[in-house]
Image (tube, helix red, strand yellow):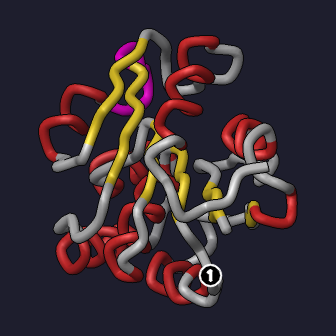
């Protein structure tokens, strides 16, 4: 099973979800709606840990942060797309009155160190997050640097790289 985590103000039926359905049956892809602004990060991680039988996690932007943290906690590999890491650097300026910055910092401090396979796709023209900084702070198994901004919807290079990256996850059963 695949857990797909959308970004801030995103949709569970985002681009990565649609691409996953091109490779896996719908019943193998779990993609919950998440209200990152109103949900405590610690509470959110506890909720996400309830999903059983997850072979790997895909996370986009802020969902990439949670995919990375959850992957480390549960020892599950992940694919991060323009991950929001470290979130405490970005989220307070993106969400007015955000009240969980301390919890984001806590999760980074407690669970940042990589304990599993991590694959990452970075749009090098990301106008929201710094791909150069992200690459510097992350220790990943493999990174793909592509043309494109924060949203990679409609980016053919991203689609190709995404499917290439999925080839690294041998435990999930494709269609």
In this view, which residue lies farthest toward the right? 26
State which region is magenta.
124-129
Expressed as whole percent of the image width and height from the top left, the position of residue 157 reads 54, 13
Q: Is residue 19 left or right of residue 150?
A: right
Q: Which residue in the protein does label 1 denote?
A: 53
| Magenta: main secondary structure | loop
Expressed as whole percent of the image width and height from the top left, the position of residue 94 reads 48, 43
Tell me the residue at 70%/46% (across/down): 10
Q: Is residue 106 left or right of residue 1?
A: left
Residue 115 seen by the camera: yes
Q: Is residue 54 left or right of residue 149?
A: right
Tell me the residue at 37%/40% (across/down): 120
Residue 21: which quarter of the image? top right
Q: Is residue 99 left or right of residue 163?
A: left
Expressed as whole percent of the image width and height from the top left, the position of residue 126 reads 42, 21
Residue 96 seen by the camera: no
Tell me the residue at 63%/64% (across/down): 3
Q: Nearer the viewer, residue 37 or 152?
A: 152
Q: Is 83 included in the stretch rendered in magenta? A: no
Expressed as whole percent of the image width and height from the top left, the position of residue 13 reads 81, 47
Q: Is residue 135 above or below residue 171?
A: above
Secondary structure of the residue carrying numbered label 1: loop
Graded by Cα atoms within 10 Å as few (under 14), some (14 to 19) or many (20 or more), the crowding at tag 1 reads few
In this view, which residue lies farthest toward the left? 136
Residue 73: which quarter of the image? bottom left
Residue 12: which quarter of the image? bottom right
Q: Is residue 66 above or below residue 72?
A: above
């Amino acid at each position: 099973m695949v857990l797909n985590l959308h970004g801030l103000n995103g949709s569970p039926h985002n681009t990565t979800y649609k691409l996953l359905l091109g490779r896996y049956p719908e019943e193998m892809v779990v993609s919950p709606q998440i209200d990152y602004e109103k949900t405590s990060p610690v509470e959110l991680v506890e909720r996400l840990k309830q999903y059983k039988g997850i072979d790997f996690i895909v996370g986009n932007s802020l969902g990439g942060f949670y995919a990375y943290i959850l992957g480390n906690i549960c020892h599950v590999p992940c694919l991060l797309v323009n991950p929001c890491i470290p979130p405490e650097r970005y989220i307070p300026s993106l969400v007015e009155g955000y009240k969980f910055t301390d919890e984001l910092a806590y999760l980074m401090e407690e669970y940042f160190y990589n304990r599993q396979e991590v694959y990452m796709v970075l749009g090098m023209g990301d106008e929201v997050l710094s791909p150069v900084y992200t690459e510097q702070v992350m220790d990943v198994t493999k990174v793909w640097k592509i043309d494109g901004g924060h949203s990679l919807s409609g980016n053919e290079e991203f689609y190709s790289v995404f499917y290439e990256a999925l080839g690294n996850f041998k435990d999930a059963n494709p269609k």
